[in-house]
Image (cartoon, rainbow, N blue to C red):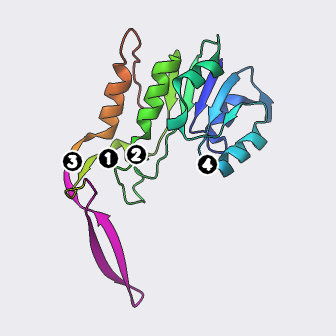
């Protein structure tokens, strides 16, 4: 299988496609990774140590231009794209903000349209299933307005800033499923959701 690996991190998801387990021993599969992409320099370095034979593109995915992607793939037909865009925005442990990281699934979709694999695996945290688009209040210059919350913890006054919410849209997972299922032209995917 020919694979493109996005939002690779140090290679946790990669591991399952790179190796197979036989009688308690790991063996390299016949899968071919055409390239991987990771923004974090430290994670990309760890990935390259873990998988030195995979072409790591250590750049912001938004800067991975169509011409570069086509050049990396060459004449290869891609069977699978794997990847899990950053989850901090969706995590129920965090502040759940619909920020730039939350919108990086759009880059996954953009590359899906360029590469046109037979299938894809999109992985994220469970919090993605319950989060809605959040629209933030802005000032006259388009800057997000913030409010400050103060509370006491262990005898100290702690202050936190939160963006002011002006409304909510549809569930993020519904947006993703609809956009991935209705790609322009003949390309469209049947979406199977597991959790």
Mark 2 or mark 1, earlier in chain: 2
Label 2 secondary element: helix
Mark 4 or mark 2, earlier in chain: 4
Q: Is residue 88 visible?
A: yes
Give me the C-alpha separation between circle 4 and circle 3: 31 Å
Give me the C-alpha separation between circle 3 and circle 1: 10 Å
| Residue 159 percent across, percent down from the top left | 35, 78
Residue 166 magenta: yes
64 or 50: nearer the viewer: 64
Among the 4 quarters of the image, the one containing residue 133: top left
Mark 4 or mark 3, earlier in chain: 4
Q: Report which residue position mark 3 lands on.
A: 168
69 up-or-down from 51: above or below:
above
Which residue is at 66% across, 49% downward? 41
Q: Report which residue position mark 4 lands on.
A: 40
Mark 1 or mark 4, earlier in chain: 4
Among the 4 quarters of the image, the one containing residue 4: top right
Q: Report which residue position mark 2 lands on.
A: 102
SS assignment for the magenta stretch, majority: strand
Q: Quadrant of the C terminus?
A: top left
Q: Report which residue position mark 1 lands on.
A: 131
Label 1 secondary element: loop
| Residue 5 percent across, percent down from the top left | 60, 31
């Amino acid at each position: 299988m020919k694979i493109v690996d996005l939002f690779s991190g140090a290679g946790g998801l990669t591991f399952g496609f790179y190796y197979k387990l036989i009688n308690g021993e790991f063996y390299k599969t016949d899968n071919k990774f055409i390239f991987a992409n990771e923004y974090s320099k430290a994670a990309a370095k760890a990935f390259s140590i873990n998988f030195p034979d995979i072409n790591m593109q250590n750049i912001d995915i938004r800067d991975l231009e169509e011409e570069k992607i086509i050049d990396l793939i060459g004449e290869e037909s891609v069977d699978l794209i794997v990847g899990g865009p950053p989850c901090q925005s969706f995590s129920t442990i965090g502040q759940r903000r619909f920020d730039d990281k939350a919108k990086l699934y759009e880059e996954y979709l953009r590359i899906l349209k360029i590469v046109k694999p037979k299938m894809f695996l999109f992985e994220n945290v469970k919090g993605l299933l319950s989060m809605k688009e959040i629209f933030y209040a802005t000032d006259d210059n388009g800057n997000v307005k913030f409010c400050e919350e103060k509370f006491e913890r262990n005898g100290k006054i702690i202050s936190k800033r939160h963006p002011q919410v002006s409304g909510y849209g549809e569930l993020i997972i519904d947006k993703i499923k609809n956009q991935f299922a209705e790609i322009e032209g003949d390309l469209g995917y049947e979406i199977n959701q597991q959790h």
